[in-house]
Image (cartoon, rainbow, N blue to C red):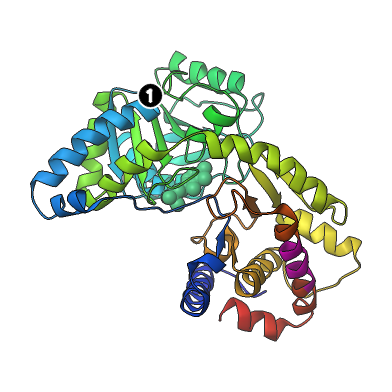
Amino acid sequence: MIVNNSLDEVKKRESALKIIKEIINDNGRDSLYDVTGLSGGFIANDDELDLLETYVGPAIFEDELQIVGKEHLGGEKVLAVNRTSSGILASILALVNEGDHVSHFLAEFPAHPSIPRSCAIVGASYDEFVDIDKFTIPENTSLVVVTGSTMDHKVIDEELFKKVIDMAHEKDIPVLVDDASGARLRTAVFNQAKATELGADLVVTSTDKLMPGPRGGLMAGREELIDEIKVKANQFGLEAQPPLILAMVNGIKNYTEENLVKAISRKEEFYELLSEKYEMFEKTPTGVMVSEDALKNQLEKLNVKTELSKKDCCFLWAMVLLKDFGIITIPAVGMPGASATIRIDLSTQDVIDIDLNELYEKVDQSFERFLDLSQDVEKSKELIFY
Ligand SMILES: *Cc1c(COP(=O)(O)O)cnc(C)c1O
């Protein structure tokens, strides 16, 4: 095993960033293809940047965020936080006490680790469910969480979504929706309603997922709850700073459903190409992916034996994709605990117009190189901890 804990994941991420810097220095930004679906964009003009240096800026941008944020997410009030994880932590700090319980419903495991981790910090018990018949809300529950779209872009069924909200509300328990990518994926691709329209009390989305914004978290919902969460966010420094808020405003203004809709049809073509040779690819709403298990099965099918764990295999292939082909995927650059699934999102600016045969060649060649490397643990280590 090469990557065994969060520290190893941090080291692996540092390697990936180092490789990205080398590629940019040697060949420029155009030789990178970010297919993570996380753009981390920072749209701002000079006038806006000048305003950041005065006390006027925050007043203007925060006010503007209230307007565009409410259009994007609905709700009575919005709150900008540093990350989606920060919003989840602030919510749990505000609404959940020691000895309380949090029940979480999602379409498919795994859930984002920030939810159980935040529960552990306050000393609350936590349970997560993917089967509605097993879903329960014990008496000491103070918060119900619903994930709109998982890290692997598995989207919840809208009827189940409403059912969980109803079950919580029957017991007067507020519902927080982790709609990190879902706020756009569910609405643009699956024609679902906004979480707040479905009755959720709180929603948090990630402003760099499937939209041209910075990494940050945007919350919306019932004003009294948002106010309580804002207090905790401020007390613990979880709130977004003015530069982030400026870029969030512009990210939301520049978001269109067009790229997502275009990616839906292109992913079919791409999936067909890949599936002529490989069994491991699955479709996502806006691209394709290979899960840890699917990669393991593909290796077995090819009779390739390796000492690497299935997670290590994902990390290794992701590092090959990055180093040799400039393709950035989440297992290479993700934060500790992020999904090891190799997802290729076709809605991102870098590949929205790319020739799919060209992209196929890169993926195919990278896989061959990964297979070679997987036979040599030392060399694999050298790449993962570059
Ligand atoms: C990405 C994601 C998060 C966390 O977002 P951060 O910006 O990393 O905090 C939480 N939940 C889900 C479902 C996600 O996809």
Which stretch appears magenta?
361-368
Residue displayed at 73% across by 72% down: 308
**Residue 9 higher or lower than 279, as above or below:** below
**Residue 238 higher or lower than 167, as above or below:** below
**Residue 243 higher or lower than 25, as above or below:** above
Percent coordinates x, y for residue 87 in the rendering: 35, 43
- Outermost residue, left direction? 55
Of residue 29 and residue 336, the one placed in the foreground of this image is 29
Percent coordinates x, y for residue 214 in the rendering: 37, 51
Quadrant that contains the N terminus: bottom right
Of residue 302 and residue 309, the one placed in the foreground of this image is 302
The answer to whether 307 appears left or right of 71 in the picture is right
- Outermost residue, top direction? 170
Q: Would you name the residue on which mark 1 appears?
A: 201
Of residue 208 and residue 350, the one placed in the foreground of this image is 350
Image quadrant where residue 224 sits: top left
Residue displayed at 77% across by 59% down: 295
Residue 340 appears in the picture as rendered: yes
Q: Secondary structure at mark 1?
A: loop
The answer to whether 344 appears left or right of 367 in the picture is left
Residue displayed at 28% across by 50% down: 44
Residue 228 appears in the picture as rendered: no
The answer to whether 238 appears left or right of 57 in the picture is right
**Which amino acid is tagged 1?**
Asp
The residue carrying pointer 1 sits among few (fewer than 14), some (14 to 19) or many (20 or more) residues within 10 Å by Cα, namely many
Residue 373 counted in the magenta span: no
State whether the magenta stretch is mostly helix, strand or loop: helix
Residue displayed at 48% across by 77% down: 18
Percent coordinates x, y for residue 322 in the rendering: 60, 69
The answer to whether 54 appears left or right of 229 in the picture is left
